Amino acid sequence: MPRTLWLKFSVFNFVLVALLGVIMRYKILYSLPFLEQKHLQEAHSHFAFYGWITNVLYILMVIYLSKVRPEISVRKYNILIILNLMAAFAMIGTFIYGGYFWGSIAASAVALLVSFVFAFFFVKDLKYLRETSKIWFLGGLFFAVISSAGVFNLAYMKSSGNITQDLYLASEYYFLHFQYNGFFIFACIGLLLYSLKEAGTLIIEKENKLMFWLMFFGCLIGFGLSVLWLKLSMPVFALIILASLAQTYGAFLLYRIVRRSWTNLILKWSAVQRFVLIFVGTAFAAKILLQLASNVPAVSQFAFGFRNVVIAYLHLVLLMCIATYLLSLVLATNYFNITKSLITGLKLFLAGIFLNEFMLGLMGVFSIKYIAVPYANHFLLAFSVLILVALLMIFVSLRRRKEI
């Protein structure tokens, strides 16, 4: 399948993620008795991970591979992308039908096995390459592979009926942490650094490696931030604090590289591209600062004690940061005509994302005093509809450039 169709199909999958989000928001306010909210949530989250984010990362990473190693055949990756999509669509049906049961677990297992095979081939094909982004892709794939331990443990507990609440939550957070803080973030940084290089930025190898290892060990040990509600010893807690500081400094080094590149970006990137980078960068900075603040016990108890805060944080990272950046990369591939309607759709999308995050954050703050924000769920439904409409506009406006 041509890359333009792969990328457009990825945006279609994002539309489906948004549609599931709208249905979930609608069901909070109005009756849909034939759909189980928990099952919808599971379908929404799994398809967002595999049908949208993982899928588009695979495609963009294969495009990167074809640029740095043009002699490599990408046919095997096309097969893996198809298998991942089949598993992702199976997840929608099985999770909506029955939540976690043999069907949805089998679909999840197929997607995980595909990730193992993709990682094996990608590492093999980059073996003798010396390039700035390589280390970030390899690190991201490492986290993608080890995150599977959390899913396998959840599947074992579900099938055996031997469920311990703390272990169940820890396994769930383990998978989520190493997916979005590991695979997604590291792959996005790899794509960002390569796009900066294409714009003419010189990235110093020593600085790149320092930034990588700070963020790598920060992510590896930083899983502890997700389980601070467990009784951890003081030495372990001190190590987690050091990991948070390491990631914070690594993020600062990344900011310094982007700032150094800004003159090139003004010349090579459009104003919309630069604005999206600032938008995503602000979300990433907020994520790093919140992560650092969560080392304070009072802040950690607040974060894990209120569902709205958890949802706001997940949307900050996955939607405002990762998904928005990946969508901008799809549009920046030069495979599509950038039309006025497409730009309008992108602006509406950014507005919807911001308003959604603002409302979730407001609900989280008011949760401290157990105060409900008036008509909050009505606003969230409206914002989710806005995001869906914006994505539909973008999808419909995607037109293949004739010169490609």
Image (cartoon, helix red, strand yellow):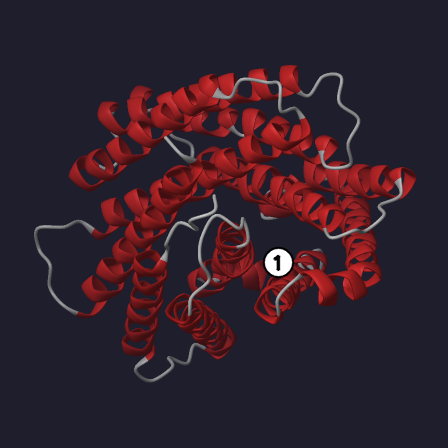
12 sits to left or right of 402: left
Front residue (pair 12, 168) = 12
Q: Residue at x 33, y 56 (%)?
A: 395
Q: Residue at x 58, y 37 (%)?
A: 183
Percent across and percent down for residue 118 are 51, 21
342 to 205, vertically: above or below: below
Whether residue 97 is visible, yes or no, is: yes
Residue furthest front in the image? 403
Percent across and percent down for residue 141 are 60, 28
2 sits to left or right of 298: left
Amino acid found under the numbered disc labelled 1: Ser
Q: Residue at x 66, y 24 (%)?
A: 69
Front residue (pair 129, 101) = 129
Percent across and percent down for residue 283 are 61, 64
284 sits to left or right of 18: right
8 to 371, vertically: above or below: above
Q: How many marks?
A: 1
Residue 232, by quadrant, is: top right
Q: Residues within 10 Å of mark 1 (few under 14, many from 20)?
A: some
Q: Residue at x 16, y 38 (%)?
A: 97
320 sits to left or right of 23: right
Residue 275, by quadrant, is: bottom right
107 to 251, vertically: above or below: above
For the N terminus, the image quarter is top left
Q: Secondary structure at mark 1?
A: helix
Residue furthest left in the image? 34
Front residue (pair 167, 202) = 202
Whether residue 155 is visible, yes or no, is: no
Percent across and percent down for residue 321 are 56, 58
The residue tagged 1 is 300
